[in-house]
């Protein structure tokens, strides 16, 4: 951040959390249901890599981890497809990765400013969305109805969120306008395309 009061120049550096990127299907093996429905697992893999200070994730390691998490969920809980945020927290972050439960939390009934506040604190934010409402041109039409996105910065100048979106190989540093992203946020239950009876705005926050 640079201030020059005499010349009235103000330059603010955008702080983007260094979150390694992976798609949910690193080798485009979309026929594998564990990868086809692996956005939550991929989001957790990225979040944990960041929390552990890793700089990158290889495609092979990402694929192995996403599949291993899905197999763990299926064996222990009977489901690996659409995973709610509370279950993602307890099953994956705490159950699979053994991450400190005090450093991962789910918040409900959130406002737009809540997303910005957590990112400003240096925390990572994961949000469940109606993927079709995101209007991402790189999704296979019409887009996923249930999709998780990782938020790693907010650009106040452009009013955009900088994300790692596991649903496309072009998802690293993908930007969504704040109004589109927040409108798309929609909690979904654990299961397989179970009915969504009401719109709930939720987020999962990961701290280092």
Image: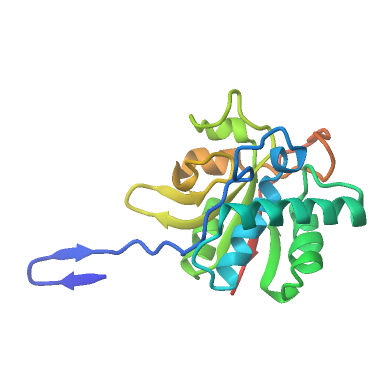
Image point 70% across, 45% down: which residue?
Answer: 38
Quarter of the image containing the C terminus?
bottom right
Image point 54% across, 73% down: which residue?
Answer: 53
Q: Nearer the viewer, residue 161 or 139?
A: 139
35 over 75 or under it: above or below: above
Rendered location of residue 66, percent (x, y): 70, 52
Q: Residue furthest left?
A: 7
Q: Residue furthest top?
A: 141
Number of numbered labels in the structure image: 0
142 over 11 or under it: above or below: above
Q: Nearer the viewer, residue 172 or 207?
A: 172
Quarter of the image containing the N terminus?
bottom left
Asked if residue 109 shows in the view, the reply is no
Image point 63% across, 42% down: which residue?
Answer: 25
Rendered location of residue 147, percent (x, y): 65, 41
Image point 30% across, 64% down: which residue?
Answer: 13
Q: Nearer the viewer, residue 204 or 169?
A: 169
Q: Is residue 122 left or right of residue 191?
A: left
Q: Is residue 64 left or right of residue 122?
A: right
Asked if residue 93 shows in the view, the reply is yes
Colouring method of the image: rainbow
28 over 122 or under it: above or below: above
Rendered location of residue 171, percent (x, y): 50, 44
């Amino acid at each position: 951040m640079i201030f020059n009061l005499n010349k009235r120049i103000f330059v603010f550096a955008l702080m983007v959390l260094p979150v390694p990127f992976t798609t949910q299907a690193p080798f485009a093996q979309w026929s594998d249901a564990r990868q086809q429905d692996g956005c939550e697992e991929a989001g957790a893999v990225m979040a944990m890599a960041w929390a552990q200070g890793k700089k990158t994730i290889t495609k092979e390691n990402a694929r192995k981890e996403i599949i291993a998490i899905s197999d763990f969920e299926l064996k222990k809980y009977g489901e690996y497809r659409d995973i709610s945020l509370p279950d993602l927290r307890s099953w994956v972050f705490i159950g699979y990765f053994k991450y400190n439960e005090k450093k991962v939390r789910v918040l409900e009934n959130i406002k737009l400013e809540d997303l910005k506040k957590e990112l400003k604190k240096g925390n990572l934010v994961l949000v469940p969305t109606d993927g079709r409402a995101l209007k991402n041109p790189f999704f296979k039409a019409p887009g996923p109805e249930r999709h998780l996105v990782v938020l790693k910065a907010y650009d106040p100048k452009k009013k955009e969120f900088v994300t790692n979106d596991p649903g496309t190989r072009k998802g690293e540093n993908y930007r969504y306008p704040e109004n589109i992203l927040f409108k798309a946020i929609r909690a979904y239950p654990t299961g397989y395309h179970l009915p969504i009876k009401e719109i709930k705005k939720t987020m999962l926050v990961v701290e280092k």
